[in-house]
Image (cartoon, grey):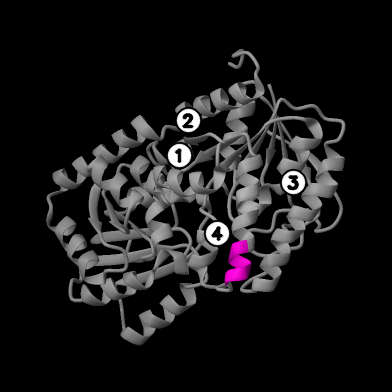
Amino acid sequence: MRVLVVSQYYWPEDFRINAIVESLAARGVEVEILTGKPNYPEGEITSGYRAWGCQREQRKGATVHRVPLFPRGKNSHLRLLLNYLSFIFFGSVCGSWMVRKRQYDVIFVYGLSPILLAIPALLIGWLKGKKVIIWVQDLWPESLLATGYIRNQIIISAVRQAVRFIYRHADLLLVQSRAFEEPVRVLASDTPIIYYPNSVDDSFAAPARCDPPVVTGLDNGFSVLFAGNIGAAQGVDVIVEAASLLKEYADIHFVVLGNGSCRESMLKAVERNGLTNLHLPGRFPVETMPCFMQKASALLVTLADRPIFAATVPNKVQAYLASGKPIIACLNGEGARLVAEAGAGLVSPAEDARALAEAILQLYGLSPVEREKMGENGRRYYQEHFDHDHLVDELIGHLQAAAGVGKDIQ
């Protein structure tokens, strides 16, 4: 089976699609990727690449086609918009030209925000007469509304029409959260929709085999670790407030690993409030994350209190479950439901600092055996519902069904 994967993001950028492509290739699928020039999260084109011109390379059994891309920069809405538009344009024009002589059985889209990035795939699918599967990672236009950057109803309406066009011209929509099914169905009309969740690299579920850098607050006492993007969507102000409420507990430390638009404001809040129990050491390589998680007493996931985020399952939930550590989920909706259903930790409402502080104290007061039991529950739930190999096999089934090819993949 020959598959063209369309994704604006791919290695050396760190996204879930990397592991999926590698696993597909390892199972005998002939995989090619149409992508842009790497520039996430730094905002500038990665060394060894250039923004303009087309490039082709090989990586772990897959052929990678790279189209020109305007780098996203940092903290610039205009540059981010140009970044998205450049992939849509060059992916459609240059991408179609680069793969014009290539043959595929099916086209698969890794549908991160904005979903408009699926347009090149639909064009190539139309030109080649092949079916297109889109894996929807975010709800649109709800995501646009949630950022607050655009409130003009004319623009929102135009985006909604574009999303409707994309959904209705796809042949299958996979959704990462069960709560996505209904809002996607409203726009998708008769296009089939199937729940297909995210997973994580197997290293999160394996015993840690590395010795990560020493991070203040993580190696002693009761450490609550947050790992990932530090942005408005994560509602990270709640971490600062909870740390303030718990600063009299000298043994409890918050460690926030990562970077993002809100990290600077958190650092200022730490200094302003004299918080010695909240540490923001910065961003570390993704391969060190399983090791950091194994050192933590508990893992914290937060999201802002908005309807769209109640429907979303942050990918870190699967990583936390796989790690076998107790989870504190300060969010609403589907993500909180998964943690509670797994018996993997404690749940508090999104952006409720007092409830978060109480949940941390409750977990802190449990015996090590009780906390270990929560971690075991989470890992078992991960293996039953989110195991990487199982989900890759499931994806191959969806691709084969769309392509109409036999089940001869190893």
Tell me where residue 288 appears, x and y as whole percent.
47, 50
The residue beneath circle 3 is: 120
Disc 1 or 4, which lies upstream in sequence?
4
Residue 214 visible in the picture: no
Q: What whole-number distance in Å separates the C-alpha atoms at marks 3 and 4?
A: 19 Å
Pointer 3 or 4: first along the chain: 3
Q: Which residue is mark 1?
A: 197
Work out which quarter of the rendered image holds the C terminus and state it.
top right
Which one is nearer the viewer's eye here, 148 or 322? Answer: 148
- What residue is shown at x 25% (from left), y 42% (from top)? 341
Relative to 296, 372 lies left or right: left
Left or right of residue 263: residue 382: left
Q: Which mark is residue 141?
A: 4
What residue did someone put label 2 on? Answer: 391
Callout 3, which amino acid? Pro
Up-down: is 332 above or below 104? below
Q: Is residue 398 left or right of residue 129?
A: left
Q: CA distance from mark 1 to mark 4?
A: 21 Å
